[in-house]
C-alpha cells in the first residue's frame, strides 16, 4: 500500500542518517524522500508529499550533484498545488538531470499530464509516446514512485488523449493493450478504469450494447478493489448505455436502481439524482 511505503521510505531515510555522512549516504536519503513524496501523491496525500519533499530539498543542498528523482517529485508536488510556474521550472530541471536515465520515463509522463491538463492534446500525446518508449526499462524504478505498472498506465492515459482527439480506433487498441497488462498484474483498480474507458470509446462509436458490458465489467472490477464510488459511476454509465440501446430497457432501470442505492449509501448526491432519473 502507498501509505505503508511512505512510512517505510521515511524510516529508511532516518536510518541512513545514523550512518557516517558521505555523499553516497546523503544521496540515498534524498532519493528515499523523493520516492516517499511520489508514493504520498499516489495515495492522494498532498500534505505529506509537501512535507517530505521539503525535507529532501533541505538535504540536497549538501550534495555535490542534484537528484533527478527529487526534481521530478518537486514538479509533481507543485502541480498538485496548482503552482504552475514553479512546477514548470522544476520539471525543466528534472528533464535536464534525467537525460539518459530511466527517470526520463517518469519525467515525460509528467510532461504529458501537465500538457493534457493545459489542453495541449497534441503535446500530451507526443510526451506520452516518448514516455512509453522508456517505460519498460523504467518499470522497476517507477514502482518506487507509486506506479504499479507504468506501461499499463501510460497506455491507458495515451488512449484517453486519443479519445479526446476523436481517434476512437487507436484509443480502443491502446486500451486493449493496457487491459491485458493490468489483468496480468492482477491490479483491479487499473482494470476498472481501463474497462470504463473502453465503455466510453464504444459509446462514442454508438455501440451501446458492448459499451454496457464494458461498464458492467468495470463495476465488477471496482467492487473487487473496494472502490465504491467508481463502482457507482460505472453502474450509472452502464444504465445510460443500456437505455440508449433500448429506451424501454427493464435492465437499464434495474441497473440504475442499483446505482441509486449505492450512491445514496456512499453520499454521492449527483449520482443518486442521475440514477433516479433513469430508474
Image (tube, rainbow, N blue to C red):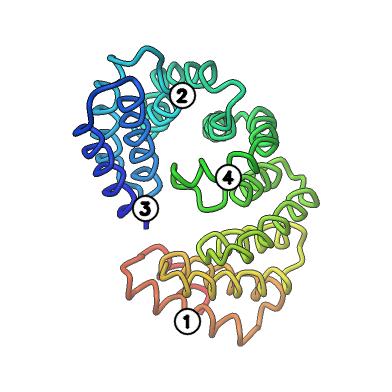
Q: Secondary structure at mark 2?
A: helix
Task: For marks 3 and 1, give the one nearer the viewer.
Answer: 3
Q: CA distance from mark 3 to mark 2?
A: 21 Å
Which of disc 1 and disc 4 is earlier in sequence? 4
- Percent from the top left, x then y, of residue 246? 70, 78
> Dot 2 corresponds to which residue?
68
- Percent from the top left, x then y, of residue 224? 48, 74
> Dot 3 corresponds to which residue?
2
Q: Secondary structure at mark 3?
A: helix
Which of disc 2 and disc 4 is earlier in sequence? 2
Q: Is residue 191 left or right of residue 23?
A: right
Which of disc 3 and disc 4 is earlier in sequence? 3
* Residue lying at 52% horizontally and 34% vertically, measured from the top left: 117
> Dot 4 corresponds to which residue?
139
Task: For marks 2 and 1, give the one nearer the viewer.
Answer: 2
> Dot 1 corresponds to which residue?
257
Task: For marks 4 and 1, give the one nearer the viewer.
Answer: 4
Image position of 164 with respect to 263: above or below: above
Q: Secondary structure at mark 4?
A: helix
Which of disc 1 and disc 2 is earlier in sequence? 2
Q: CA distance from mark 4 to mark 2?
A: 16 Å
Q: Is residue 237 left or right of residue 75?
A: right
Which of disc 2 and disc 3 is earlier in sequence? 3
Q: Do tag 3 and tag 1 residues touch (Cβ < 8 Å)?
A: no
Which of disc 1 and disc 3 is earlier in sequence? 3
Closer to the camera in the image, 274 or 192? 192
Amino acid at each position: 500500500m502507498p501509505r505503508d511505503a511512505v512510512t517505510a521510505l521515511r524510516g529508511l531515510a532516518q536510518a541512513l542518517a545514523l550512518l557516517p555522512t558521505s555523499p553516497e549516504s546523503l544521496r540515498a536519503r534524498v532519493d528515499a524522500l523523493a520516492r516517499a513524496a511520489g508514493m504520498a501523491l499516489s495515495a492522494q496525500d498532498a500534505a505529506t508529499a509537501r512535507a517530505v519533499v521539503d525535507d529532501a530539498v533541505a538535504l540536497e543542498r549538501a550534495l555535490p550533484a542534484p537528484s533527478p528523482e527529487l526534481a521530478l517529485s518537486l514538479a509533481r508536488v507543485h502541480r498538485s498545488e496548482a503552482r504552475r510556474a514553479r512546477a514548470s521550472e522544476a520539471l525543466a530541471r528534472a528533464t535536464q538531470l534525467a537525460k539518459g536515465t530511466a527517470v526520463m520515463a517518469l519525467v515525460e509522463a509528467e510532461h504529458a499530464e501537465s500538457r493534457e491538463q493545459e489542453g495541449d492534446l497534441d503535446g500530451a500525446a507526443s510526451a506520452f509516446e516518448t514516455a512509453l518508449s522508456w517505460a519498460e526499462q523504467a518499470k522497476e524504478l517507477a514502482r518506487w514512485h507509486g506506479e504499479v505498472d507504468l506501461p499499463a498506465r501510460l497506455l491507458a492515459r495515451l488512449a484517453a488523449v486519443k479519445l479526446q482527439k476523436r481517434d476512437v480506433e487507436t484509443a480502443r487498441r491502446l486500451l486493449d493493450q493496457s487491459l491485458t497488462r493490468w489483468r496480468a498484474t492482477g491490479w483491479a483498480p487499473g482494470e476498472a478504469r481501463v474497462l470504463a474507458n473502453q465503455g466510453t470509446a464504444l459509446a462514442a462509436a454508438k455501440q451501446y450494447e458492448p459499451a454496457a458490458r464494458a461498464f458492467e465489467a468495470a463495476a465488477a472490477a471496482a467492487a473487487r478493489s473496494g472502490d465504491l464510488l467508481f463502482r457507482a459511476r460505472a453502474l450509472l454509465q452502464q444504465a445510460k448505455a443500456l437505455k440508449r440501446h433500448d429506451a424501454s430497457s427493464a435492465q437499464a432501470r434495474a441497473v440504475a436502481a442499483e446505482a441509486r442505492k449505492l450512491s445514496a449509501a456512499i453520499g454521492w448526491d449527483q449520482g443518486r439524482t442521475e440514477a433516479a432519473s433513469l430508474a
